[in-house]
Image (spheres, rainbow, N blue to C red):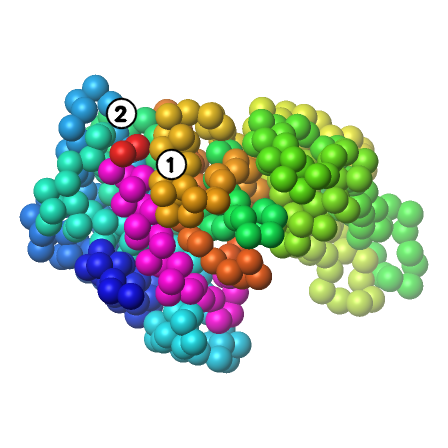
Amino acid sequence: MTRSLLEHESVEFVRDLIRIDSVNTGDPDTIGDGETRAARLVQARLEEVGIETTFVEPIPGRGSVVARIAGSDPDAGALLVHAHLDVVPVVAEDWTHPPFGADIVDGLLYGRGAVDMKDFAGVILAVAREFARSGIRPRRDLIFAFLADEEAGGRWGASWIVDNRPDLLAGATEAISEVGGFSVPLVEGRRAYLLATAEKGVGGVVVTARGEAGHASRPRPDDPVTRLASAVARIGEHRFPVVHTPALDRFLRVFGQERGVEFTDEGLDAQLDDLGFVGRVISASARQTAAPTVLRAGDKSNIIPASAQATVDLRALPDREVELRDEITRLAGDAVDLHWQESLSPIAAPIDSPFVTAIGDAIRAEDPDGVVVPYLLPASTDNKHFARLGVLGYGFVPLRVPDDFDVYGQFHSADECVPVESLYFSARATARILRSA
């Protein structure tokens, strides 16, 4: 099959970006200049075809690039198309393929960032060049943003641009980025393409128990380790109720109708588990969650410490943050203190809109039996930062993959990979979305 220049360049640029080690450790002392080198590569490729760019580097090594292509409808809000250029760390010995080699083996492209998210960065770079070369004028302004620091919270990338250069995003009303767009089995011969229309909030609480230090040979009734353990166990074992968000209800309706299943709150976990890997994602998005992640107490076995601490990761559903805090306070009890950490609020966009319709049309043009299905992302993306400017964020990186290929499971994994055929599909579908949205 003859491939277009758009398709060829998409794969080429994804590989070029993977070969740049842009690991973001979150520690300024161990972060190199990979993000800036990746941003400069993107900038050079855009300017080759006459697209004006703006490069920003708030601190050395944390570079981002923003560019705009004018649309034909001056009254339409701009669409922000964004991808982050940083990746999470790797343990090289866990990989069977070099994490920054961008090797293609048996039709799979391996490398850190293959799905998170240098795949989309390479694809939208190729699409922007295709539009510029061909004189294609999209309906609305397209703002392409290639960003630093998403993996550590976006302080030097999306958040910095929102706070310091909002002019680069002028007129943006909607955004498209991760995490969604990948296909999952719907029924035999048909695929659903998940569209993230909402994201849980991200926060945490530090739980502290205090007492009096003493020799472990004389156990104390106010032992802070015991009181902390009790509070953490109550929090970690608590099962929050199902919350019927618009995204969850639409997902359950579509999958229920197609599979002949009547989903119920009481049996939802087991019913979702029957859907395979996609069900586990939806299960995590169906309710609030609190997960104890860090425990700290004494450092000597024969000393009862004066204090003990635990950190609990909190994920709130849209409009449910206060409810989550109240429940954690109740579960923790009076024997511990709570310190709420800084959080990113949940976000939600309409599950029905002209933009969502345009995404569905583009997918059906490439996969006539495909259907776009909203869902709520239980994690977080840079869309949360852009929401502070009133931009409605959607997660949709089009990828048609084999039914047994778990795209979500590739995130942050060893031997992260993506089918090359899926990148070709992504290039065609993304071009359709951006041209007509």
In the picture of the structure, the residue carrying the numbered disc 1 is: 361
Q: Residue at x 17, y 22 (%)?
A: 74
Q: Residue at x 73, y 60 (%)?
A: 298
Image position of 303 with respect to 80: above or below: below
Which range of residues does the magenta coloring cover? 410-435
Residue 128: x %, y % from top left: 20, 47
Local packing at callout 2 (Cα closer than 10 Å; few below 14, some 14-19, many 20+) is some
Q: Nearer the viewer, residue 225 or 120?
A: 120
Q: Give the label on residue 77, or none.
A: 2
Q: Amino acid at mark 2?
A: Gly
Q: Nearer the viewer, residue 417 or 67?
A: 417
- The quarter of the picture where the N terminus appears is bottom left
Residue 303: x %, y % from top left: 80, 62
Q: Residue at x 43, y 44 (%)?
A: 368
Q: Tell me which numbered mark, 2 or 1, is placed earlier along the sequence.
A: 2
Left or right relative to 391: residue 227:
right
Say if residue 372 shows up in the picture.
yes
Q: Amino acid at mark 1?
A: Asp
Q: Can you tell which quarter of the image residue 288 is in?
A: top right
